[in-house]
Amino acid sequence: MCGVFGIWGHPEAAKLSYLGLHALQHRGQESAGIVTSDGHRLYAHRAMGLVNDCFRPADLATLPGASAIGHVRYSTAGGSHIRNAQPFSVDDARGSIAVAHNGNLTNADDVHERLEARGSIFQSGSDTEVIVHLVAMSTQRAVEDRIADALSQVRGAYSLVFLTENALVAVRDPMGIRPLVLGTMKTEHGDDVHVVASEPTAFDLIDARLVREILPGEMIVIDRHGVRSSRPFATAPTRLCVFEYVYFARPDAKIGGVGVYEARKRFGRRLAEEAPAVCDLVIPVPDSGVPAAIGYAERSGVPFEMGLIRSHYVGRTFIEPQQSIRHFGVRLKLNAVSETIRGKRVVVVDDSIVRGTTSRKIVKMIRDAGASEVHLRISSPPTSWPCYYGIDTPTRKELVASSHTVAETCKFITADSLSYLSRDGMLDAVATSPGCSSSAEEFCHACFSGQYPIPLGPPPRGRQLPIAGVAS
Ligand code: AMP
């Protein structure tokens, strides 16, 4: 999973991109990068790690110009390596172009092979690099035509921002699987500035205003002539990723007209209706389970308590004592408040179960803290299928729900009961939210249903195809 950002027309483009990426940090923590243009050439800085660690003031000083694109990466195709850090850029006789991508192409390997056979030299293991090669090879003249030409040869999920010396282009795939929004702000001299980002939270931080969502299949070109919109692809049904609401997006973001925090509360209310439990307390698994737990408590009339406390200082590396400590990893992040939990029948609300290992440890932790019963409620359906459109999920084999019934999973995680939100309940909860621009049929729910809206090519390297039931 990744986050993208773009800005056009601001003398401090690099610094504002840095702040925008900061607000998108939850979408990727492996690497970050910014490419700027001063109207003559592109300048790039990419590094591994969190945004804060990737850009020192001296790095930002090497990025002049009034337009920029940026990227935070969470690897879904290609390993965690600096050569896969984005934005990618290429130079050719016609100039330079850089791209930042959120999503995953499903036919990248095919295109890669074809391009290599024709002499292209790839620097990374990322699916995104094929896009810049295709743009560079296009015989079209205008940049938007070259991009449209390139994208007509790829399949998959993409929210993209491109930067050339004198244009910024934002494109969303025809099904609109990943979000992408357009915003505006002014310079201190009153000049118009245009911004694009994966989520509008990036705008809030820099005092930009959300203008609108970039539509599925829409291309926005921003250059000295202003902002132009076109729809260069054949129309396709909308399939916005519902997992953005479940887990991925920040709760303060608005996606598809719906506030993510509100959507999660609605999931929790539905879950309380579908799967009530006789209990004394509702507690969330922080942070991602909090809004759904609030909704569950509200609808069930049971008190809400923060029975688990999360440390916000868990780094990427830590020193584990030689003598093994049970549940060390999860305890580094979460600890139970035993005074609150002791002797209580507790409903624990989390957003999803992937492998089941975290839930198992959390149930044990709450039981050890003295709970008399632990009932786990999950505010989405069982995650049984890998995502091929840009969310990092393990192979089918590793997903506990792909090979275990709910009763078996409950036994594995040692809970007294386990229930998930139904697929219809989840889709209906978002689609009936005030302001929602999609109907219940217009979401991608492949990770829950195996109904993949975009045909899968050979999987990206190192990934495994789903075992069966691929709907195209
Ligand atoms: P697991 O132990 O694998 O079952 O992990 C479950 C937890 O991972 C849940 O609490 C989710 O909040 C979180 N989660 C779900 N999807 C993802 C994802 N794609 N990347 C990272 N964490 C996730």
Image (cartoon, rainbow, N blue to C red):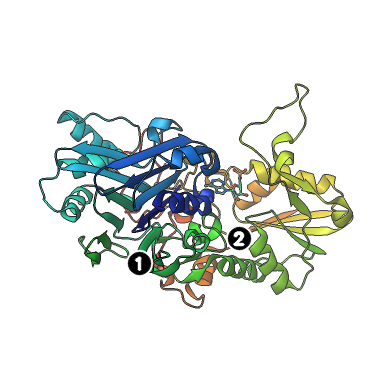
Query: Camera-side residue: 286 or 276?
Result: 286
Pointer 1 residue: 191
| Relative image position of residue 167 (x, y in whole percent) | 25, 54
* Rendered residue at 52%/49% (across/down): 25
Residue at the limit of the structure toward the bottom, as seen here: 434
In the picture provided, is 399 more to the left or to the right than 407? Answer: left
Residue at the limit of the structure toward the top, as seen here: 322
| Relative image position of residue 453 (x, y in whole percent) | 34, 56
- Give residue 301's quadrant in the image: bottom right
> Which quadrant of the rendered structure holds the C terminus?
bottom left
- Give residue 236's quadrant in the image: bottom left
Q: Give the number of callouts.
A: 2
Query: Does residue 160 lie above or below 222 as drawn?
Result: above
* Rendered residue at 45%/35% (across/down): 47
In the picture provided, is 38 more to the left or to the right than 367? Answer: left
Query: Camera-side residue: 86 or 34?
Result: 34
Type of the residue with mark 2? Ser
Pointer 2 residue: 379
Label 1, residues with CA under 10 Å away: few <14, some 14-19, many ≥20:
few
